[in-house]
Image (spheres, rainbow, N blue to C red):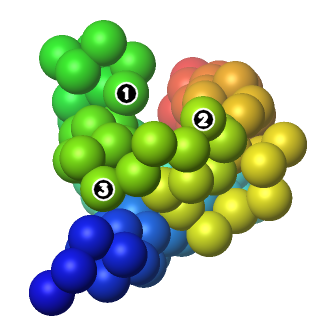
Amino acid sequence: MNNRQRLLAIKWLHTLIWAFFVAVIFYILYCGIANDVQVYTWIAIGLVLGEGLVLLLFRMFCPLTIWARKYSSSTKDNFDIFLPEWLARYNKVIFTTLFLIGVLFVIYRIL
């Protein structure tokens, strides 16, 4: 497997994991808005918090981004994922905000 193929594989993996976590964040939002808080809501919150911990451990970089750097010299924000560059650039801000809003809704519902 050459470097281009390795980078392509990482991009696909990164995109799939990103899509999973986006779905989880929207599920948390749904649970809070629809007042449907259940054990899966807490599992979802735990998964996102775990992802946040991983990002903190890697100085706010996804480990897949660090891995992909070995196979690309690109300076684009989306060199390692199949997202528009603007979304890759603001990904953490957008989805952290949505996550926090979802958690606030969930807390409101349980209180």
Up-down relation of residue 83 to residue 46 (above or below):
below
Query: Contact, CB < 8 Å: mark 1 with mark 3?
Result: no
Q: Secondary structure at mark 1?
A: loop
Q: Dot 1, crowdedness within 10 Å: few (<14), some or many (≥20)?
A: few
Tell me which residue sits at (72%, 34%) in the image.
89
Circle on res. 71: 3
Residue drawn at 15 percent across, 87 percent down: 1
For the residue labelled by badge 2, is the local secondary structure a helix, a strand or a loop?
Answer: loop
| SS at badge 3 | loop
Answer whether labels 3 and 2 touch (C-beta < 8 Å): no
Q: Name which quarter of the figure residue 19 lies in.
A: bottom right
Residue type beneath disc 1? Phe
- Quadrant position of residue 93: top right
Which residue lies under the disc numbered 1? 61
The span from disc 1 to disc 3 (Cα, nearest Å) is 16 Å
Please give left or right for residue 36 compared with residue 59 in the image. Answer: right
Which residue is rendered at x = 62% and y = 69% of the image? 82
> Crowdedness of circle 2 by 10 Å Cα count: few (<14), some, many (20+)?
few
Residue 95 visible from this viewpoint: no
Where is residue 46? Give x, y as percent. Answer: 28, 40
Give the percent coordinates (x, y) of residue 78: 63, 51
Q: Nearer the viewer, residue 32 or 8?
A: 8
